Amino acid sequence: MEFDFSDDCPPGGSLLAYGVALAGFTVSYEPNYSWMGSLGISLVPYRIGRKVYATASAVYNDFSGDLGRVVPFQQFPLCSVQATALALVGTSIDGHVVLGNRHGVGSGEVLPGIQIGSNLSHWGYVAGFSFTTSDPSGSYVSGLSYSVQDSVDGQESMTLAASASTPSSNASGTLDLLALSLPDAVRNFEVKLLSIPFAPAQETGLSGDFSATFNPPPGKSVTRVGLLQQGVDLVYQDNQYVSTIQASFSGLRLASPTLKGTYRLDMGFPFARVGASSGASIYAIAQFG
C-alpha cells in the first residue's frame, strides 16, 4: 500500500511522524471442515521520502492445510485489508507528538507512560491482530473480539490497554496498536466516532450505513478522509465451521464536509451468520485544507 503526502508537505518540509491503522478486513477460505489454526491481519509501515508504505498481510488457515483465498471461488470472497495512514508533516515538531505503531501487544497488556504533555486529545486504534491455536480438536471459533482503550493517568501521559479474545480457551491473541496525540495547535484535522445502526443483511451478516459531518475552519474544506478501527465484536450464532470473517467498509464517498459509507460485519459459513448482538467501534478522521 502507498500513501503519498508529497502535496501536503510545505517547502523544505518532511514527514515528522507517521503510523497506520486498520480500517477494515476480509478473510476467507474454502474450508475442509477443520478447526482454525491461525488468523491474523498485520500492517508493517515504513517511509520513503514523503510517502508512507504499508506491507499488509492476511492469514487464515486451519489444521487441514487450507489457506486464505486469493482467487475467486463460488460465493467465497477474497482476502483483503483496508488501512488508513496518518502523518505529521512540517519542518519541525513543537510540543508532544505521539504518532506511531506498537506491534504484538498481548491481550490484557497495558502500555503506560506514553508522554503527551498538555495535549487534550488522545486516541488508540487497532493496527492489526493475531490469533493462534495449538489444539486441532478444540479450536472452534464461535466469536471474535478485539479492542484498544486509551486513557490519561493524570500525569501528562496516556495509557493504552489491549484486548483480543475468542470464546475458545485454546486460542491466544495479540494486537498491533496505533497511538495518536498531537498538540492542540495542530488544528487541521478532526476525529469522529461513527454511529452505525447495524441490521441483518440478507445472507451477508450485518450491515449499517453511516454519515459523519466534520467542522472545518472558515475557508477550509475536507481534503482527505479515512476510517480507523478501535474495536470489533463478532458473535457467531451457529456451530458450523467458519469460512469467512469480515469487518470492512464499502461505498465511501465524500461531499465536504460530510462523509458517508457502509460498514459490514460478517462471520460464518454459507447460510450461517454473525449474530445481531455483534458490533464495532469505528472512527472517521478528516484532514482540512
Image (tube, rainbow, N blue to C red):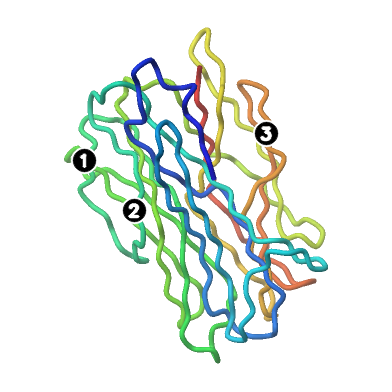
| Nearer the observer, 65 or 140 | 65
Q: Residues within 10 Å of mark 3 (few under 14, many from 20)?
A: some
**Residue that carries the numbered disc 2 in the rendered image:** 102
User: Looking at the rendering, which quadrant does residue 202 occupy?
Assistant: bottom right
Discs 3/2, front: 2
Label 1 or label 3, whichever comes before in sequence order: 1
Secondary structure category for the residue under label 3: strand
Residue type highlighted by circle 2: Arg
Q: CA distance from mark 1 to mark 3?
A: 34 Å
> In which quadrant of the rendered image does the N terminus lie?
top right
Image x and y of residue 60, in percent: 58, 71
Give the residue furthest to the top: 219
Q: CA distance from mark 2 to mark 1?
A: 15 Å
**Residue that carries the numbered disc 1 in the rendered image:** 115
Label 2 or label 1, whichever comes before in sequence order: 2
**Residue that carries the numbered disc 3 in the rendered image:** 260
Residue type highlighted by circle 3: Lys
Q: Residues within 10 Å of mark 2 (few under 14, many from 20)?
A: some
